[in-house]
């Protein structure tokens, strides 16, 4: 086996190796980690960040970035809670909450694909707009709910498996299939790898990029609805930092920030590492400030490692 193949294998399984290392360390440090109750809580905590991360991964692979997902989560949460408190209609509330995400994603996608302005600028602007609208609409106050059937959506479980974890697994299965087994998925990789070549090849680049942002907005809104159910409240400050968490999960999972390369299942591993690491540090009573430092170090290591592997692979080509 030549060295290039060795480096490619190392890049493919590095994230899994890091997760296994963390689990082994926790096995020896505390007996509270590997309990059904704690693992169930970890699954519930991971699931919502992971769902957003799926959309973020697709956006990054296409060569873009979406900094509006956190504001979409908050906006969808508050609109969903407001509609439910006024009408009492769960289905209507969920549909309108999800529609918010689709609309914002469509606006992002159209502006980015039609104008050519950097996705960073467009999505940062829509994030600010959505956040401001949410605060004005709610007057910066939560919208409490008392609807038992709606609460079950985010708080329920099947045996020891929380419902949000089930939603997460279904989401990953569906979009992993889309990214690996459909033309749409291959187009996303092609656009992120070389957009000009994709245009020459006849790929409908603008339409594909727009749809990617719509999917990202949809999944962010879906997360907002689940959070609303889980918290029994629409919270205007809910989405703070969610965009960075999603980017972190994607990067740790091996998605290249330059586009064209990444994996939905790799992102799941990235989200699991973040969730397990945070849970482990909480069990070990590590100050939350240090948790941010640890997370930052892990992300930096992931980026540097990926760059190192890519350099070695390129040099051996």
Image: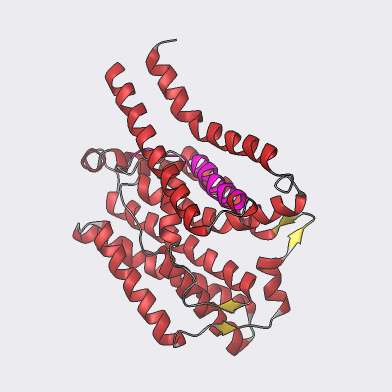
Query: In terms of image quadrants, where is residue 2?
Result: top left
Q: Depth check: 226 or 6 in front?
A: 6
Q: Depth check: 132 or 98 in front?
A: 132
Q: Is residue 83 above or below residue 114?
A: below
Q: Image check: 160 left or right of 85?
A: right
Q: Depth check: 154 or 33 in front?
A: 33
Q: Is residue 311 above or below residue 65?
A: above
Q: Image check: 231 left or right of 74?
A: right
Can residue 317 be seen?
no
Q: What is the quadrant of the C terminus in the image?
A: top left
Q: Main secondary structure of the magenta part?
A: helix
Extent of the magenta region: 260-280
Query: In terms of image quadrants, where is residue 165?
Result: bottom right
* Residue 56 % position (x, y): 42, 53
Q: Is residue 34 above or below residue 145?
A: above
* Residue 5 % position (x, y): 42, 17
Give the residue drawn at x 34%, y 29%: 308
Q: Is residue 272 magenta?
A: yes
Q: Is residue 112 magenta?
A: no
Give the residue drawn at x 20%, y 57%: 116
* Residue 142 % position (x, y): 53, 82
């Amino acid at each position: 086996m030549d060295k290039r193949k060795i480096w490619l294998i190392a890049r493919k399984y590095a994230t899994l190796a890091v997760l296994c290392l963390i689990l082994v360390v926790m096995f020896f440090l505390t007996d509270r980690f590997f309990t059904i109750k704690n693992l169930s809580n970890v699954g519930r905590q991971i699931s919502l960040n992971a769902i957003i991360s799926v959309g973020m991964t697709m956006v990054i692979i296409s060569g873009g970035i979406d900094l509006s997902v956190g504001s979409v989560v908050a906006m969808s949460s508050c609109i969903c809670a407001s509609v439910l408190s006024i009408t009492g209609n769960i289905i209507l509330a969920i549909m309108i909450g999800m529609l918010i995400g689709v609309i914002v994603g469509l606006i992002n996608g159209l502006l980015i694909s039609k104008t050519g302005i950097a996705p960073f600028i467009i999505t940062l602007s829509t994030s600010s707009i959505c956040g401001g609208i949410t605060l004005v609409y709610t007057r910066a106050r939560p919208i409490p709910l008392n609807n038992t059937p709606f609460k079950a959506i985010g708080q329920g479980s099947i045996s020891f498996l929380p419902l949000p974890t089930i939603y997460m697994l279904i989401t990953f299965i569906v979009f992993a299939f889309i990214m690996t087994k459909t033309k749409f998925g291959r187009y996303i990789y092609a656009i992120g790898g070389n957009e000009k070549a994709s245009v020459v090849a006849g790929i409908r680049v603008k339409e594909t990029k727009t749809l990617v942002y719509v999917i990202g907005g949809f999944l962010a809104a879906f997360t907002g609805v689940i959070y609303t159910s889980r918290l029994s409240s629409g919270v205007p400050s809910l989405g703070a930092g969610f965009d960075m968490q999603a980017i972190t999960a994607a990067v740790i999972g091996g998605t290249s920030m330059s586009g064209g390369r990444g994996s939905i299942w790799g992102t799941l591993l990235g989200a699991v590492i973040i969730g397990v690491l945070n849970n482990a540090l909480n069990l070990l009573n590590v100050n939350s400030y240090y948790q941010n430092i640890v997370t930052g170090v892990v992300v930096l290591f992931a980026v540097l490692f990926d760059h190192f592997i890519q350099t070695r692979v390129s040099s051996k080509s």
